[in-house]
Image (cartoon, rainbow, N blue to C red):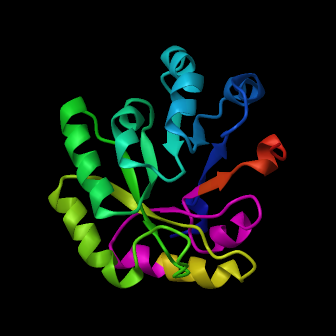
Amino acid sequence: MSINNYNPKIVAISKTFKIDHILPLINFGHTDFGENKVQEALEKWKQVKEKNNKLKLHMVGKLQTNKVKNALKIFEYIHSLDSLKLAEKIAKEQENLKTKPKLFIQINIGQEFQKSGIDVEKLSDFYQSCKNMSLEIVGTMCLPPENQDSNIFFSKMKKLNQSLNLNELSMGMSNDYLNAIKYSATYLRIGSSIFGSRN
């Protein structure tokens, strides 16, 4: 990837912020926003999106299977596909709703028991299962372990993404996005650096 045409997309993580706090950024022309709760996203964004069809919403939190139907009504991107059960539910609902979200497979890159995500050694089989269900997998996503050098994990993610021939790579947040850029992240999930700290 040449540096000249490398232009990562910033997903402004707007979760917990009121729409009034977000509108200046929308009016400035920013189009991609991230939320982590389906109900909050529906209440906050439904009317705004009806007035602006360029806006794209990204689900960046853990998605429960019982929320998939509503999630597909508001989100164009889901960054947290982390289980076969969730994949099957999305496949069913996208057929019913005649919609097709762009999906990132969440990888548990640090092998942390408290985090969800697909194990690295199971990634290839999981990806094939998703393709068999006609899911639109565009890339992979990770949350590297805190208090460790994120470069190590971003480097692994880049190699895994390349092994699947996927174009998109969702990684990097306010504290480590410069490291993520070094390893070809295409979607940066930036919250506090844009909106300030949350309550």
In magenta, the rendered stretch is 159-187
Figure quadrant of the C terminus: top right
Q: Nearer the viewer, residue 97 or 113?
A: 113
Residue reaching furthest to the left: 132
Q: Is residue 55 visible?
A: no
Q: Is residue 155 above or below residue 28?
A: below
Within the image, what quadrant is residue 182 found in?
bottom right
Q: Nearer the viewer, residue 68 or 35?
A: 68
Within the image, what quadrant is residue 31 found in?
top right
In the image, taking residue 114 as reference, residue 103 lies left or right, namely: left
In the image, taking residue 187 as reference, residue 126 lies left or right, namely: left
Residue at the spot x=78%, y=44% of the render? 194
Residue at the spot x=42%, y=78% of the render? 160
Task: Give x and y (percent) for residue 64.
Answer: 42, 49
Is 164 one of the magenta-colored residues?
yes
Task: Give x and y (percent) for residue 48.
Answer: 57, 19
Within the image, what quadrant is residue 181 found in?
bottom right
Q: Is residue 161 visible?
A: yes
Task: Give x and y (percent) for residue 196.
Answer: 84, 44
Residue at the spot x=28%, y=68% of the render? 127
In the image, taking residue 11 as reference, residue 149 lies left or right, namely: right
Q: Is residue 83 above or below residue 113?
A: above
Residue at the spot x=70%, y=64% of the render? 177
In the image, taking residue 54 as reference, residue 124 lies left or right, namely: left
Is 38 one of the magenta-colored residues?
no
Tally the marks.
0
Q: Is residue 76 above or below residue 157?
A: above
Task: Give x and y (percent) for residue 97.
Answer: 24, 30
